[in-house]
Amino acid sequence: MNNFLTGIDHIQIAAPPSSEDAARNFYGELLGMREIPKPENLKARGGCWFQCGSQEVHIGIQQDFIPAKKAHPGFTVNALEQLKLRLEEAQYMISEEPPIEGRSRFLTHDPFGNRIEFLAFE
């Protein structure tokens, strides 16, 4: 069987209309992702894009937005406890989760209610 897939280019996380500033604050300022320019032909759709390692995180505007409560991205981090403290200081609720296969982890929600997981290899 041919293995057609070679990796993940980007993930898209939905957000409500006019939420770009909140996305920039959470994904850019709080999490430290670098915002990257959207292609000209997509700018009118709204939203914003970020670099995360060699992948991209696209925040896409959805008119009938409903937060993702189960589906979620899992971001790897190099300072899990420090990130947890940073999020708590910014008033984000943390949900402790048991480690899985040598990875410590916790969950939170972005400003729009989307579930987000953070993991660190032990």
Image: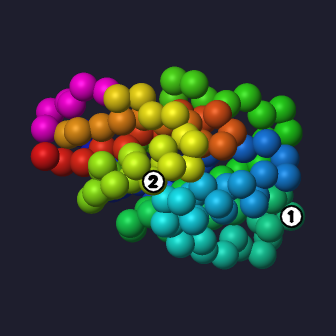
Q: Is residue 17 left or right of residue 93?
A: right
Q: Between marks 1 and 2, how big is the CA–CA gap?
A: 33 Å
Instruction: Say which quarter of the image contains residue 82.
Output: bottom left
Q: Is residue 56 visible?
A: no
Q: Is residue 44 visible?
A: yes
> Looking at the image, which is closer to me, 59 or 40?
59
Q: Amino acid at mark 1?
A: Ala
Q: How many marks?
A: 2
Which quadrant holds the N terminus?
top left
Q: Of helix, strand and loop, which one carries label 1?
A: helix
- Where residue 9 appears, x then y in whole percent? 46, 59
The image's mark for residue 44 is: 1
Q: Main secondary structure of the magenta part?
A: strand
Q: Amino acid at mark 2?
A: Arg
Is residue 58 located in the magenta-colored stretch of the structure?
Answer: no
* Vertical order, 27 against 99 (above or below): below
* Vertical order, 77 against 38 (above or below): above
- Using a 10 Å C-alpha cutoff, classify the residue at mark 2 as few (fewer than 14 neighbours), some (14 to 19) or many (20 or more): some
From which residue to which does the magenta span run?
97-102
Colouring scheme applied when the structure was drawn: rainbow
> Looking at the image, which is closer to me, 96 or 20?
96
* Residue drawn at point x = 75 percent, y = 60 percent: 21
* Vertical order, 99 against 22 (above or below): above
Number of the front mark, 1 or 2? 2
N-terminal of the two: label 1 or label 2? 1
- Where residue 108 appears, x then y in whole percent? 49, 36
Q: Of helix, strand and loop, which one carries label 2?
A: helix
* Residue drawn at point x = 60 percent, y = 74 percent: 36
The image's mark for residue 86 is: 2
* Residue drawn at point x = 69 percent, y = 39 percent: 112
- Where residue 7 appears, x then y in whole percent? 35, 54
- Where residue 54 appears, x then y in whole percent? 39, 67
